[in-house]
Image (tube, rainbow, N blue to C red):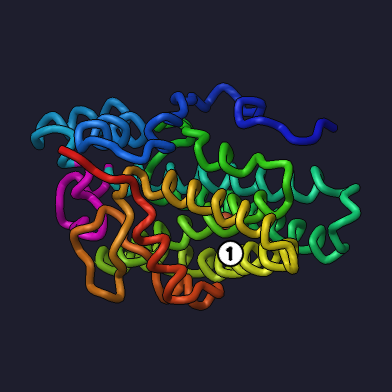
Amino acid sequence: MKKFMTSDELARDDRFTRSSLPLDFLMAEEVTVEQIETTMTTLLSNPDMLKSMEDEGGAASLLSGGPRLNPEEERAKLTMKTQMHGIFMGEMQALEAAGRSAWDFQDNEELPWEFQLDMCRQTWDEGRHVEIYSALLDHVDCEIGEFNENLFLFEFGCSDDPAERVTGVNRCLEGLALDVFQQTIRFGKAADDETIAQSVDFVSADEVTHVKFGQVWAKALTEGDPERRQKIVNFQRKVDRAFSLGGLRGGSYDGGATEAFLPIAREFRKVAGFSDEEIDEVAGAGPKVTS
Ligand SMILES: [Fe+2]
Ligand SMILES: [Fe+2]
C-alpha cells in the first residue's frame, strides 16, 4: 500500500462532494473581513444554509452562530446540522490521518514500538468516533453528503517528518476538535439534548488522549536537537494560524468569551498537557485582520 498520500488521494464514495481547499486564505498572514466571510460561507454552507443566510442579512449571520447559538432560534437546527456534518468529516480525516501515521512510519528506525501503538490506539478511537457521529447525524436529521467536504484538516497532516506529523494531526487538528466539541456540548446542554451533550463529552475524553500523544511525541522526537525542535515549532505556528480560520478562533470559554466564533477549550487543553503560555499562543495565532 502506498505511503505518504496527499489529501486529494483520499477515497470517498459518490455521496461525498469536495469543495476546494482555501490554502491561500489559510496560509495568509493578513486577511480581510470579506475574505473571512466568503471563505467560511464556502466551507460551511449548502443551498439551505445559503437561503437562510440570504434571509438573515448575508454571510456575517453565519459567523454569529458560534457559542451564542440559541437552540430556540429557527436556524439553530440547520447550524447544528452544519456543525455535525463538519465534525463527521473531521473524524473521517482524523481516522485516515492516524491510520496513515501508523502505516507511513512503520520502517522508521527512529521510532520506538510505542509510537505505532499510540497511532493504532488513535485509529481505533477515530473509527468509533466516525460511528458515533454517523449516529448523531441521524439524530439531527442530516444525511451524509448533505454538505461539502473540505480536506484542510488532512492537508496539514501529510508531513513525512513524524514529529511534524504528530504536531499537525495530534496537537493542532485534535486541539481544534477540543474547541469545536466544547461548543457542541454547550449547545447540547442548552438545547436539553442529552444525546448530543453526552456523546460528544465521551468523544472529547478520547481526543484529550490524542492531543497528549502529539505533545509527548513532538517533544520526545526533538529532544536534544534544538534545530529540529525550532523547525517543529515553526510548523506548529503555521498550522495554528491556518486552523484559526482567519482569526475566528480565540478567547476562551472559561474567560466567558462570547464574541469569538470559536473560543478555545482552555480546560480540555490543560488536561491534554498544554501550558497557559501554549494556550495563549494558540489563541493569538490568527492572521492580522483588516477591514
Ligand atoms: Fe476523533
Ligand atoms: Fe482524535
Q: Residue at x 20, y 32 (%)?
A: 34
Check disc 1 and report its element: helix, strand or loop: helix
Magenta portion: prevailing SS class: loop
| Quadrant position of ligand 1 | bottom right
Q: Residue at x 73, y 68 (%)?
A: 223
Q: Residue at x 38, y 36 (%)?
A: 28
Q: Nearer the viewer, residue 109 or 96?
A: 109
Q: Which region of the structure is painted magenta?
A: 62-78
Q: How far from the left and from the top, in percent, is residue 215?
A: 62, 67
- Quarter in which the C terminus is drawn: top left
The residue identified by callout 1 is 211
* 81 over 270 or under it: above or below: above
| Residue 93: quadrant of the picture | top right
Q: Is mark 1 within 8 Å of ligand 2?
A: yes
Q: Nearer the viewer, residue 66 or 38?
A: 38
Asked whether 20 falls inside the magenta stretch, the response is no
Q: How far from the left and from the top, in percent, is residue 171?
A: 56, 59
Local crowd size for mark 1, using a 10 Å CA cut-off: few (<14), some (14–19), many (≥20): many
From where the camera sits, is residue 20 visible?
yes
Number of numbered discs:
1
